[in-house]
Image (tube, helix red, strand yellow):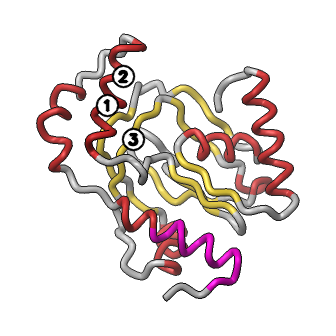
């Protein structure tokens, strides 16, 4: 989302128009960044490099209240799989209406939420096998010195994530947008 390519600019414009028309937006990774940028936030290349593999983040007080309003047992330090170099550093909350779910040392804004928006920088859809493939491809294609790729090969499968809690949160959020009762 930190790219001036025409297709990225067009995507951001379309996302902004959709959200302003009252459509619901759910963003993951690049989608998290696109939504933030579209609504006036700031996305930059992370000076700390890639966040790659399993990591957790601390929910903000507002983020915790939002998440637990949907899923009462949502973890205070959710862990997901990550594969990104760009980061959202400012949501421009006064304009966008977005609030931070929380962050960590690698990425200050790991997710956002608003009236009709929910985003996560991490990947709840990645299982450990797919994460290993992504890390290997990043290493191959970009020549990135992913020092965590080798350790990931031996231990990533054993690292737990909260992907099911995040998936339940996303489902609950979307259901609430449509006033659907979940059982």
Query: Of all residues shown, which one is farthest toward the left?
Result: 154
Q: Is residue 71 left or right of residue 174?
A: left
Mark carried by residue 85: none
Of 148 and 49, nearer the camera is 148
Of 111 and 154, nearer the camera is 154
Instruction: Read off the residue under disc 2.
Output: 137
Residue 34: % across, % down: 67, 41
Asked whether the beta carbons under mark 2 and mark 1 sit within 8 Å of each other, the answer is yes
Mark carried by residue 82: 3
Residue 128: % across, % down: 27, 44
Say which quadrant the N terminus sits in.
Answer: top right
Label 1: which secondary element: helix
Q: Is residue 43 left or right of residue 172?
A: right
Q: Secondary structure of the magenta portion, mostly?
A: helix
Q: Residues within 10 Å of mark 2 (few under 14, many from 20)?
A: few
Mark carried by residue 133: 1
Asked whether the beta carbons under mark 1 and mark 3 sit within 8 Å of each other, the answer is no
Quarter-of-image position of residue 13: top right
Give the mark, 1 or 3, whose residue is nearer the N terminus.
3
Quarter-of-image position of residue 42: top right
Q: Compared to 40, does 4 lie above or below? A: above
Residue bounds of the magenta highlight? 168-180
Of circles 2 and 3, which is in front? 2
Q: Residues within 10 Å of mark 1 (few under 14, many from 20)?
A: few
Label 2: which secondary element: helix
- Confirm whether the magenta stretch covers residue 122: no
Q: Residues within 10 Å of mark 3 (few under 14, many from 20)?
A: many
Of 134 and 115, nearer the camera is 134
């Amino acid at each position: 989302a930190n790219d001036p390519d025409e297709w990225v600019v067009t995507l951001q414009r379309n996302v902004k128009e959709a959200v302003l028309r009252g459509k619901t937006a759910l963003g993951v990774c690049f989608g998290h960044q696109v939504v933030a940028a579209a609504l006036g936030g700031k996305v930059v290349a992370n000076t700390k490099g890639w966040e790659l593999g399993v990591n957790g983040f601390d929910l903000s007080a507002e983020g915790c209240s939002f998440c637990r309003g949907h899923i009462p047992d949502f973890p205070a330090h959710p862990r997901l799989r990550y594969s990104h170099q760009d980061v959202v550093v400012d949501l421009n909350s006064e304009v966008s209406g977005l609030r931070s779910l929380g962050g960590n040392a690698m990425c200050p804004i790991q997710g956002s939420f608003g009236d009709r928006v929910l985003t996560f920088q991490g990947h709840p859809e990645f299982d450990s096998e797919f994460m290993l493939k992504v890390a290997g491809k990043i290493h191959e294609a970009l020549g990135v010195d992913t020092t965590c790729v080798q350790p990931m090969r031996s231990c990533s499968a054993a690292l737990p994530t909260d992907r099911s809690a995040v998936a339940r949160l996303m489902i609950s959020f979307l259901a609430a947008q449509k006033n659907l009762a979940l059982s």
